[in-house]
Image (tube, rainbow, N blue to C red):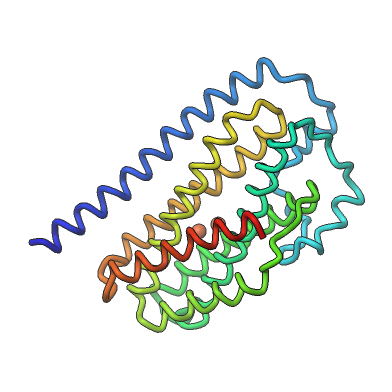
Amino acid sequence: MASALQNSLKRTTASLLVTQSRLVSATAATTTRALSTTAPTRQATTSTSPPFASSDNHNSTSSTDSSSSTDSAPVPPLKLSKEQRELLEEMIRVDQAGELGANWIYRGQYAVLGSDKKVGPLLQHMWDQEKHHLKVFDGIVSQYRVRPTALRPIWEMAGFALGAGTALLGKEAAMACTEAVETVIGGHYNDQLRELLKIDHPDIAELRKVVKQFRDDELEHLETALEHDAQKAPQHELLSNAIKQGCKAAIWISSKV
Ligand SMILES: [Fe+2]
Ligand SMILES: [Fe+2]
């Protein structure tokens, strides 16, 4: 009975997170429309090639490898205040680090469970989306000359260890890991959307689109994990809380270092 009540509470919390996301999206859409009527007219080259748009010709694994894009495309002038620029740099750095960590979590899970007929394709699908997320943030880091995290090897090792470690505990524990990580990351992207709404700048509208799309992808991963027995993992509560606290610590550290 208590367990059924707990599961019900968890599902309600997940639903609330999704509802909250939709509310943030609705607000973002309204503000974007408002900005589009007041923002200065952009040059044709900028409007046809948004600075924050997904760029598939960037290298997928290294921010430094994407430097060729800066050779061919001029860096758009970001007339932001010093505080806004610092805030954006922190956001972009932590997002790239987070997507890097996510890639290595799925790499670790896939190394253990990739051959499983049921879970393998799910992991591959989510990993593919994380590869795309990382590629886009590698491009943004390079284009805006944001200092990437100095802890790249640590996030790679920690991500792989977390992914492989939970997968070795079983499919449910692997899904519990995804549930915990995506709950924190979905909330993190929602917090960023709220901050980005406060900055009135045409380029920020593009970054907002990227963050919104990725937030939606992460919440889709969260729903997938819940649908595939994440909450049946052994010691679910303990495992989930430990992973969530680790993710929050990683977000704070990678925004600074
Ligand atoms: Fe992601
Ligand atoms: Fe994800």
Res. 36 image quadrant: top right
Closer-to-camera residue (123/106): 106
Q: Is residue 121 left or right of residue 60?
A: left
Q: In the rendered image of this protein, does residue 207 appear above or below residue 43? A: below
Number of marks in the rendered image: 0
Q: In the rendered image of this protein, does residue 238 appear above or below residue 45? A: below
Residue 3: x and y, percent?
14, 63
As drawn, which residue projects farthest toward the right?
A: 71
Res. 208 image quadrant: top right
Residue 226: x and y, percent?
32, 60
Residue shown at 27%/74% (left/top)?
Answer: 235
Q: Is residue 191 left or right of residue 238?
A: right
Res. 4 image quadrant: bottom left
Closer-to-camera residue (74/156): 156
As drawn, which residue projects farthest toward the left?
A: 1
Residue shown at 58%/63% (left/top)?
Answer: 128
Residue shown at 60%/38% (left/top)?
Answer: 209
Residue 107: x and y, percent?
55, 74
Residue shown at 74%/52% (left/top)?
Answer: 141
Quadrant in which the C terminus appears: bottom right
Quadrant in which the N terminus appears: bottom left
As drawn, which residue projects farthest toward the top?
A: 38
